[in-house]
Image (spheres, rainbow, N blue to C red):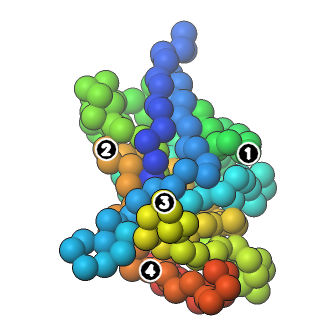
Amino acid sequence: MLWGGHEGGLEVRKRASGAFALHGRFPYNKAAVLTDGGRTGRPRKEVIASRAFEYRVKDPKEDIHLLVGHDYGQPLASKSAGTLRLKDADDALTMEADITPEMQEVSWVKVFLAVLFAGLIAGLSPGFRILPERAVPDAEKVEEEDPSLGTAIIRTIFAALLYEMSVVTRPAYPETQSEARNWTPTDGGCYCPSRPVWV
């Protein structure tokens, strides 16, 4: 699974029922710097295009979870449980999650809420896989950055399978995950994807 990250706002409100309503936003078409290239390499950036997660978001049979730090052992809400609602638009994927009073009694939820209220949760990070080439031939593209802007290699994701959204302290792509991505542009600037490492 590949992870993405962007600093999007998180907002929490308490309802009369005692549940917390957690709102979050993951903006599309924003370049995230996965690595600055170090001393000798080139910077690598990744962009998730508008509605790239649409397939699983729109399908009512496909479950998506809200997790703490990409840990399926620490779920907060899910589509199938009716506690996670996702809305896909051209500018962003937005989510609303209900943290029920029962869930607030769970140990990791107590820790999450304490960290959130302390201001240490910085945003959302999606957990996704690129759609197979046989299903969507142009699910991703890698190209050179405009030389007037820099020397980065930019990977744009057009179609991906979203499995989870996570609340994280640092919404950034882990460097180890960037190695699962192919960063080789073709001569024409288009990319014929090889399959990423599936984990």
The residue lying toward the viewer, choosing from 179 and 71, is: 179
Q: How crowded is mark 1: few (under 14 residues within 10 Å), some or many (20 or more)?
A: few
Mark 4 vs mark 3, CA separation in Å = 26 Å
Report the side of 17 relative to 57 (left or right). left
Mark closer to the observer (4, 3): 3
Mark 1 vs mark 4, CA separation in Å = 27 Å
The residue lying toward the viewer, choosing from 51 and 45, is: 45
x, y percentage for residue 62?
A: 70, 59
x, y percentage for residue 151?
A: 43, 70
Q: How crowded is mark 3: few (under 14 residues within 10 Å), some or many (20 or more)?
A: few
Judged from this view, the residue extending furthest toward the top is: 16
Mark 1 vs mark 2, CA separation in Å = 26 Å
Q: What label does residue 169 carry, if any?
A: 2
Q: What label does residue 158 carry, if any?
A: none
Mark 3 vs mark 2, CA separation in Å = 29 Å
- Kind of element beneath mark 1: loop
Q: Choose top left, top right, bottom left or bottom right for residue 155.
A: bottom right
- Type of the residue with mark 1: Asp
Q: Residues within 10 Å of mark 2 (few under 14, many from 20)?
A: some
Q: What label does residue 180 carry, if any?
A: 4
Mark 4 vs mark 2, CA separation in Å = 22 Å
Mark closer to the observer (1, 2): 1
Q: Name the residue under label 3.
A: 149
Report the side of 5 relative to 141 (left or right). left
Mark closer to the observer (1, 3): 3
Q: Is residue 54 visible?
A: yes
Say whether disc 1 or disc 3 marks the residue closer to the N-terminus.
Answer: 1
x, y percentage for residue 115?
A: 27, 33
